[in-house]
Amino acid sequence: MTVKECYAAFGGDFEGTLARLSSEKLVDRFIRKFLADESFATLKKALEEENYEEAFRAAHTLKGVGMNLGITKLYQISGELTEEMRGGKKPENMDLIAQLETEYEHTRAVISEFAGA
């Protein structure tokens, strides 16, 4: 699987990411680093502990990662969740968390396959 095929498999914006990072080698390098990012695990733990300030920060970080790497759906959902929790508020739309988890797991699985992890 090529990095472009990887992006196609998770519905990402390869061309936009390539334009930002300026080389396919850098896109490849940074998309692999997504597997080590702890933002989603931090988000889940913070939600379980009802630490909504920490959950907000984790969702905001995930939004930034998604935006910078062109992981469009992850970016969009985490952006919505970020707005729900702005100011450390408990999210009202718990469906967003389920959607985010589904999208995160799908994206992670595709990238893992691509990376041979």
Image: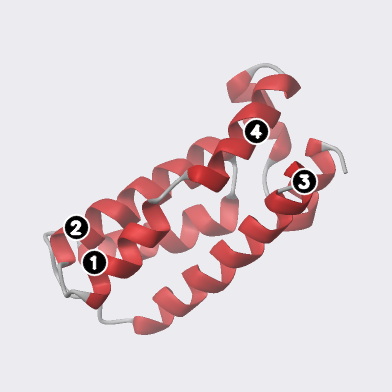
Q: Which residue is mark 4?
A: 16
Asked if the residue under mark 2 is in contact with the one under mark 1, i.e. CB atoms within 8 Å, the reply is yes
In the rendered view, would you say 15 is above or below 46?
above
Looking at the rendered image, the quarter that the N terminus falls into is top right
Crowd rating for badge 1 (residues with CA inside 10 Å; few <14, some 14–19, many 20+): some
Residues at marks 1 and 3, CA–CA distance in whole angstroms: 30 Å
Left or right, 99 with reference to 48? right
Residue under the image location 59 percent in, 66 percent down: 105
Dot 2 amino acid type? Glu
Residues at marks 3 and 4, CA–CA distance in whole angstroms: 24 Å
Q: Can residue 4 be seen from the camera position used here?
A: yes
* Secondary element at tag 3: loop
Crowd rating for badge 2 (residues with CA inside 10 Å; few <14, some 14–19, many 20+): some
Q: Position of residue 25 (x, y in %)?
A: 72, 21
Residues at marks 1 and 4, CA–CA distance in whole angstroms: 32 Å
Q: Which residue is mark 1?
A: 46
Residues at marks 1 and 2, CA–CA distance in whole angstroms: 6 Å
Q: Earlier in the sequence, mark 2 or mark 4?
A: 4
